[in-house]
Amino acid sequence: LNARWAASPVLWLSGGTPRGAVGRGGFQDIDQIGIAERATKGAWRIDDPATMADTFALAWRTMLAGRPGPV
């Protein structure tokens, strides 16, 4: 939230539980998107590595668009 209020562009990358294991108490099994959405300009989950470059580009543009902020 500090980065958001300070208009600091921050790109937050995080590992997580595979979609098929969500809700089964695995390592890192928390709602990371739900948490991130409250403190950032945008949050996305990448399930297919083929979409990583496009999602990264979207995140970068979002981070710098208008008032900069974390994504």
Image (cartoon, rainbow, N blue to C red):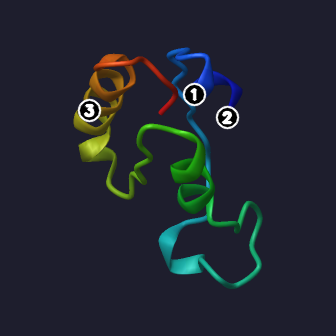
Q: Which amino acid does label 1 sit on?
A: Arg
37 over 9 or under it: above or below: below
Mark 3 to mark 2: distance in Å? 20 Å
Picture coordinates of residue 65, whole percent (x, y): 29, 20
Q: Which of 43 and 15 is in front in this view?
A: 43
Quadrant position of the N terminus in the picture: top right
User: Residue at label 2?
Assistant: 1
Contact flag, marks 1 and 2 (Cβ < 8 Å): yes
Q: Which of 38 and 27 is in front in this view?
A: 38
Q: Residue at x 53, y 57 (%)?
A: 33
User: Residue at label 1?
Assistant: 4
Contact flag, marks 3 and 2 (Cβ < 8 Å): no
Mark 1 to mark 3: distance in Å? 18 Å
Q: Earlier in the sequence, mark 3 or mark 2?
A: 2
Q: Which amino acid does label 3 sit on?
A: Leu
**Would you say 19 lies left or right of 58 here?**
right
For mark 3, give the secondary structure: helix
Nearest-to-viewer mark from 1 and 3: 1
For mark 1, give the secondary structure: helix
Picture coordinates of residue 60, whole percent (x, y): 34, 22
For mark 2, give the secondary structure: loop
Nearest-to-viewer mark from 3 and 2: 2
Mark 1 to mark 2: distance in Å? 5 Å
Q: Residue at x 56, y 61 (%)?
A: 34
User: Residue at label 3?
Assistant: 58
Q: Residue at x 62, y 66 (%)?
A: 31
